[in-house]
């Protein structure tokens, strides 16, 4: 499989509070991460960096994951521990009070991936069934959509769109969503922060991923498009392509 990771400050923000990366364990299995930090003066970047660095260290030391159940357990165990670490750090550092981060991660073996998320950073899959969102946003507007109070179209421009119901590190315990999916050779995953999805439609995401361009060109095109449409937020993405050996 081939991968690309990119992050961009955008056109408005002074700092990039997003973080992420694509990392391999000793058995060449892959962990892709996108984290979107927030809160506490400039502490959003502290939270997202802590989350990614700790996941990277744990993954690079991890044993081979041989089943979806093992993958799910690995994600739950380590994200739970990192939540405690970020929460504790915020309690001990006044300038970091209230900081937290979204996180979406994909642990990929040859035939399956485990996808975990907290917040509104997303994972999409492109496969023989089309292009669809794998994760569910933990946001106020998504709850309003689920309850039938507003439409999905209303949610795109809702004034309280940025309000999260869950984030990593903001409370002592947090609920994480994890699901496992089968993957085949033609599949692609896109992990991204809301700096991308708030600007670029799912149709345009799919169109860009489906081109014959290199992974680097696809990622560059998506970030460029989000910036052309305003770029008010940091923009971060990771693409995992099961169709090829290099990007």
Image (cartoon, grey):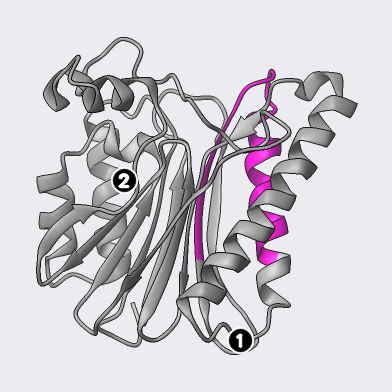
- Check residue 236 for magenta coloring: no
Measuring 80% from the left and 20% from the top, which residue is drawn there? 95
Q: Position of residue 39 (x, y in %)?
A: 63, 22
Horizontal side, residue 165 vs residue 231: left or right? right
The quadrant of the rendering that contains the C terminus is bottom left
Q: Quadrant of residue 23?
A: bottom right
Mark found first going from the N terminus, 1 or 2: 1
Horizontal side, residue 166 vs residue 220: left or right? right
Q: Is residue 30 above or below residue 80?
A: below
Who is closer to the viewer here, 233 or 217? 233
Disc 2: which residue: 223
Q: Quadrant of residue 10?
A: top left
Nearest to the eye among marks 1 and 2: give it: 1
- Check residue 48 for magenta coloring: yes
Disc 1: which residue: 64
Horizontal side, residue 210 vs residue 112: left or right? left
The quadrant of the rendering that contains the N terminus is bottom left
Measuring 83% from the left and 35% from the top, which residue is drawn there? 88
Q: Which residues lie in the magenta part?
A: 32-56
Q: Is residue 223 above or below residue 198?
A: below
Label 1 neighbourhood size at 10 Å, few (<14), some (14-19), many (20+)? some
Q: Position of residue 240 (x, y in %)?
A: 35, 70
Q: What SS does tag 1 mark?
A: loop
Measuring 56% from the left and 47% from the top, which residue is drawn there? 19
Q: Position of residue 207 (x, y in %)?
A: 10, 56
- Farthest residue toward the top? 159
Q: What SS does tag 2 mark?
A: helix
* Distance from the alpha carbon under mark 1 to that under mark 2: 33 Å
Q: Is residue 39 above or below residue 48?
A: above
Measuring 44% from the left and 19% from the top, which residue is drawn there? 163
């Amino acid at each position: 499989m081939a991968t690309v990771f990119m992050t961009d400050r955008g056109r408005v923000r002074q700092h990039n509070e997003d973080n992420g990366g694509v990392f391999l364990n000793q058995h060449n299995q892959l962990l892709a991460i996108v984290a979107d930090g927030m809160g506490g003066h400039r502490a959003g970047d502290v939270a997202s960096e802590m989350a990614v660095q700790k996941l990277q260290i744990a993954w690079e030391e991890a044993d081979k994951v041989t089943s979806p159940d093992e993958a799910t357990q690995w994600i739950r165990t380590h994200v739970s521990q990192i939540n405690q670490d970020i929460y504790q750090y915020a309690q001990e550092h006044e300038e970091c009070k209230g900081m937290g981060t979204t996180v979406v991660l994909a642990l990929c073996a040859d035939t399956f991936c485990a996808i975990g998320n907290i917040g509104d950073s997303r994972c999409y899959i492109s496969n023989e069934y089309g292009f669809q969102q794998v994760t569910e946003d933990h946001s106020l507007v998504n709850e309003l959509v689920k309850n039938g109070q507003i439409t999905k179209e209303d949610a795109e421009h809702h004034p309280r769109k940025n309000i999260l119901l869950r984030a990593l590190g903001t409370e002592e315990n947090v609920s994480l969503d994890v699901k496992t999916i089968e993957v085949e050779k033609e599949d692609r995953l896109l992990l991204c922060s809301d700096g991308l999805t708030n600007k670029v439609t799912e149709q345009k995401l799919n169109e860009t991923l489906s081109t014959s361009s290199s992974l680097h060109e696809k990622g560059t095109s998506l970030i460029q498009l989000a910036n052309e449409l305003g770029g008010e937020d940091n923009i971060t993405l990771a693409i995992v392509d099961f169709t090829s050996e290099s990007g």
